[in-house]
Amino acid sequence: MILPDVFSACLRAHPDRLAVSDGATGLTYSDLDVRSAALGDRLRAHGRSRIGIHATNSPDYVMWYIASLRAGFVPFLIDAALGAHELARIVYDCSLDLLVHEGPGAEVLGGGKLALSELVTDTDPVYELLPDTEVCRFTSGSTGKPNCVEFSGRAVANAATNWASGTGLSSEDRTLCLAGLSNGLAFNTSLLATFLAGASLHFGRGLPTASAVLRRIEETGATRLVGFPALYDSLVRRGIRRLDVRMAISSGAPLSARTREALPGISDYYGIAETGPLTFTADPAPGGLGPPLPGVRLRVDDGVLHVRSESMASRYLNAPGLFESRLDAEGFYRTGDEGYLRDGELVLTGRSARTINIGGRKVDPIEVSDVLLAAEGVRGAVVFEEADAHGEPMITAVVAASSTVDLREHCRARLPGYKVPARVHVVPEIPANSIGKPAMEAVRALVAHHSGAVNEPA
């Protein structure tokens, strides 16, 4: 195991410095060292190995993550926005033994607000972890369910080391992270990387409104702000034209031209769940995402980006062979993003894969359509991306159905909020092409002049 030793060395190198804070609770490096070690000792008594963490950002989250590693467990970092239905699917699919969560729980350890529940599994794990796997995260994929991405400890450490060195992260930095730690944007830029540098990590409190973000920047003296494009878009809509930080970092989707013009100087970080951080620029040229970070190689074949990095995932735990099918003989991963290299910098021009990006979270349309198809009276469903009134991506569904079931409510009961279609149009039949597949041009024409009311006939 690599990560327990890496974290232990970091925590003991800067004992008196502030490590993590959310404004209400703050822990020094020494506090985090002592508490995570004690919690790790208590976790070992459970004798289980797969532990899910399903919670929002907090000092307790960081303590549980490090304690899990120190206990010799493999933490599975789960998006806090996922609801009970999708969480249950992950627990079953990945054979989780324990779950750290917010709210009422069976056992509260560590003196914080997060609870630990033991989970009952019927049999031995369906999918065995690789021997060197130390962390698992999730990404929506073509399987129609969250793909569980396995990472070796070496890959996680490389991602943090290369990010810190490639972006000049230092012990004087104070990172205000407003993206969930389960997401690659936060995981790679704000967790281990912070502690490698001896810097401090800060979280927001409550909803990330423009006033709350500006207040937290002032309270923390933040030098770095980490957030999805939707955060910066919301600041621009509130009239914010300047951020008092040395570096504002965005990822997960392209920044809109309006936001980039109104709030200049936002640094783009490009990476994907399966490969870790790939490029970065503190001074983005128009359309550019910067040069490769240390340990990264980029190649464009037939207009599609292929990458190889020192922070590559090992595979998908619950989708055998899928990750490997995207690797070529030299170990380059086919990203599905289209673009080219300009003077050594990456420029993206489009996306060949079908995922929809909602506020930095990837949504697989097949997953949403499968949920719709399970509703009473639904004969067919097509899910795709449209732009809302602000020009932001939203999910639209066209459904062939004879039912009066509220389809958005049906989705809310089974999907996290960001995956619920913003518009659902009910039609007698979905237009099809000569081979029986949905004719997307005709489908889009059906909804082009409709307002988007729930179950609206097109």
Image: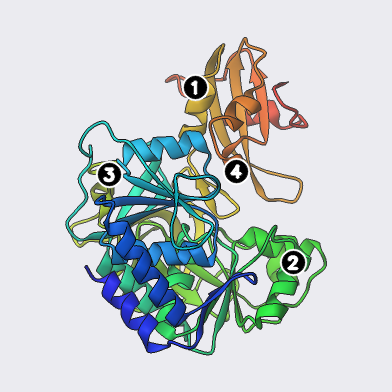
Mark 2 is surrounded, within 10 Å at the Cα level, by few (under 14), some (14 to 19) or many (20 or more) other residues, namely some
In this figure, which residue is indicated by the disc labeled 1? Answer: 433
| Amino acid on which the number 1 mark rests in the picture | Asn
- Quadrant holding the C terminus: top right
Give above or below for 436 relative to 193. above
Q: Give left or right: position of 43 versus 21.
A: left
Give above or below for 258 relative to 175. above
Q: Quadrant of residue 202?
A: bottom right
| Amino acid on which the number 3 mark rests in the picture | Leu
In this figure, which residue is indicated by the disc labeled 2? Answer: 212
Q: Distance between the residues labelled 2 and 3?
A: 42 Å
In this figure, which residue is indicated by the disc labeled 4? Answer: 418
Q: State the image coordinates of residue 401 (x, y, percent, origin top left).
A: 60, 14
Q: Nearer the viewer, residue 311 or 127?
A: 127
- Dot 1 lies on which element? loop
Q: How far apart are marks 1 and 3 (CA)?
A: 29 Å
Q: Distance between the residues labelled 2 and 1?
A: 50 Å
Q: Nearer the viewer, residue 328 or 404?
A: 404
Pointers 2 and 3 in contact (CB under 8 A)? no
- Dot 4 lies on which element? helix
Q: State the image coordinates of residue 306 (x, y, percent, origin top left).
A: 34, 60
| Amino acid on which the number 4 mark rests in the picture | Tyr
Q: How far apart are marks 2 and 4 (CA)?
A: 22 Å
